[in-house]
Image (tube, rainbow, N blue to C red):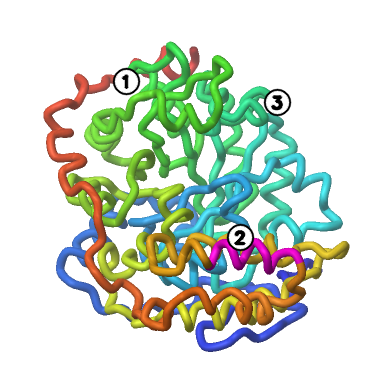
């Protein structure tokens, strides 16, 4: 029997557990009062979702992914997701990308790679790969962990991914294979499946080529949800960081997809750095918004506003002091559990280092943390040594205080820039 990791991140306290599999993790009801705008968004989202399996119906018990945190290698691990869920109850969380081969070849150690606490729901597993048999087996093995969706990576431009085994964004050049892969993944799970991709690759960057990719994948598989990073990828050796900076953003491609594929659901990604900008995208008709580095570098300023500003829920009033008390219990329960002193204090505390961004005492807190990493053995002692740097007025300030910053006009003229309407050339698109 596969077990979840040996901890439970409860809202009021942390209760260790050692042998739990959630057979129906989506059983928790969400009786949240919403304002009119949020009701309209939720209704609109589910009208766009094509429910093709019973698993999709189960996933709908959560609020829809109006806001999600992007999968980021070495960042969106269990520790970060634990912190993120303490701050926001409704943001959808993604794992780091896991190679299908890793899941298949680590069958005796799956908890390390797939385990998570049940409070992280709603949560999406992102996998990558280029061998159908491994994608099938990896998906089958992940079923015991009850993820809410399986996402296939067709957007990572890293040479480690795109250049090794030909997966990541390079797969956009082979939409027929992606359609086959998505069919294999969907066949081996009862939850929704989705694709994360860019708007193009190198010189294959026209709107029609993007549409051909979407049309073929959705026609050859049950895929009805695409996360669109609104930049193309350059595979000429530039770094992943440059691939997030050099190719220009073309939000008009994303909004044209909404027009040309009304039966599909699209989440916009790329260059969106606050809930103000996320709301701006939603106002222009986006089905959902995915935010990456801003949610990691500024977790309090970003995730702290998601539940109220995006989902219309009342503020829970939680403070960073309370969050750190709960995170301390979590951290002390997982330190060293993998053996060889892993994870260690530095690894568990890493997501916390941005919690006081731009606040008084932030610089001193980071310096004290650097020193504490060298000798502290528990999260309790780590906090005792470092939190003296942060004023009580900061620690005890309630969540979602103040007005978030961001560009409200980020998408103001996007509908004036839409490319000409796409007309699928069915025979050519499907069988080319």
Residue 187 is at least partly visible in this image: no
Which quadrant: the N terminus?
A: bottom right
Q: Nearer the viewer, mark 2 or mark 1?
A: 2
Magenta-colored span: 365-374
Residue beneath disc 2: 350
Q: Is residue 91 magenta?
A: no
Prevailing secondary structure class for the magenta stretch in the rendered image: helix
Whichever of labels 2 and 1 marks the residue nearer the N terminus, that label is 1
User: Looking at the image, which residue is at 44% across and 71% down?
Assistant: 87
Dot 1 falls on a residue whose secondary structure is helix
Q: Nearer the viewer, residue 301 or 251?
A: 301
Residue beneath disc 3: 164
Dot 2 falls on a residue whose secondary structure is helix
Whichever of labels 3 and 2 marks the residue nearer the N terminus, that label is 3
User: Residue 193: percent from the left, percent from the top?
Assistant: 51, 47
Q: How far separated are the C-alphas under marks 2 and 1?
A: 40 Å
Mark 2 Cα within 10 Å, few/some/many (few <14, many 20+)? few
User: Looking at the image, which residue is at 78% across and 66% down?
Assistant: 2
Q: How far separated are the C-alphas under marks 3 and 1?
A: 27 Å
Residue 207 tag number: 1
């Amino acid at each position: 029997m596969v077990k979840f990791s040996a901890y439970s991140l409860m809202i009021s306290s942390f209760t260790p557990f050692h042998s739990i599999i959630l057979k129906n993790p989506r059983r928790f009801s969400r009786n949240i009062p919403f304002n009119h705008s949020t009701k309209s968004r939720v209704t609109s989202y589910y009208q766009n979702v094509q429910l093709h399996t019973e698993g999709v119906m189960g996933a709908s018990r959560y609020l829809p992914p109006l806001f999600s945190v992007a999968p980021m290698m070495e960042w969106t691990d269990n520790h970060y997701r634990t912190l993120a869920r303490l701050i926001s109850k409704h943001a959808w969380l993604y794992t780091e990308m896991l190679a299908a081969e890793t899941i298949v070849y680590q069958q005796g150690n799956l908890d390390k790679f797939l385990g998570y606490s049940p409070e992280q729901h709603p949560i999406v597993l992102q996998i990558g790969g280029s061998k159908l048999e491994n994608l099938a087996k990896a998906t089958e093995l992940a079923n015991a962990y009850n993820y809410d969706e399986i996402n296939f990576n067709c957007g990572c431009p890293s040479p480690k991914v795109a250049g090794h085994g030909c997966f990541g964004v390079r797969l956009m050049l082979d939409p027929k294979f992606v359609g086959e892969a998505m069919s294999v993944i969907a066949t081996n799970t009862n939850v929704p499946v989705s694709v994360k991709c860019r708007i193009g690759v190198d010189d294959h960057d026209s709107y029609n080529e993007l549409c051909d990719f979407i049309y073929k994948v959705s026609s050859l598989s049950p895929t009805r949800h695409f996360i669109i990073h609104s930049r193309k990828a350059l595979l000429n050796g530039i770094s992943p960081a440059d691939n997030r900076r050099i190719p220009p953003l073309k939000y008009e491609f994303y909004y044209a997809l909404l027009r040309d594929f009304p039966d599909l659901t699209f989440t916009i990604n790329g260059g969106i750095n606050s809930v103000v900008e996320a709301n701006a995208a939603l106002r222009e008709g986006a089905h959902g918004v995915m935010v990456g580095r801003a949610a990691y570098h500024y977790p309090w300023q970003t995730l702290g506003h998601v539940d109220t500003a995006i989902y219309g829920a009342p503020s829970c009033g939680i403070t960073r002091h309370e969050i750190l008390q709960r995170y301390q219990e979590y951290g002390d329960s997982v330190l060293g559990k993998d053996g060889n002193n892993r994870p260690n204090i530095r690894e568990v505390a890493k997501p916390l280092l941005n919690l006081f961004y731009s606040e008084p005492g932030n610089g001193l807190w980071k310096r004290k943390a650097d020193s504490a990493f060298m000798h502290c053995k528990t999260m309790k002692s780590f906090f005792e040594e470092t939190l003296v740097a942060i004023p009580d007025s900061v620690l005890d300030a309630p969540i979602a205080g103040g007005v978030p910053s961001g560009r409200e006009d980020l998408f103001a003229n996007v509908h004036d820039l839409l490319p000409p309407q796409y007309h699928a050339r069915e025979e050519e698109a499907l069988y080319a």
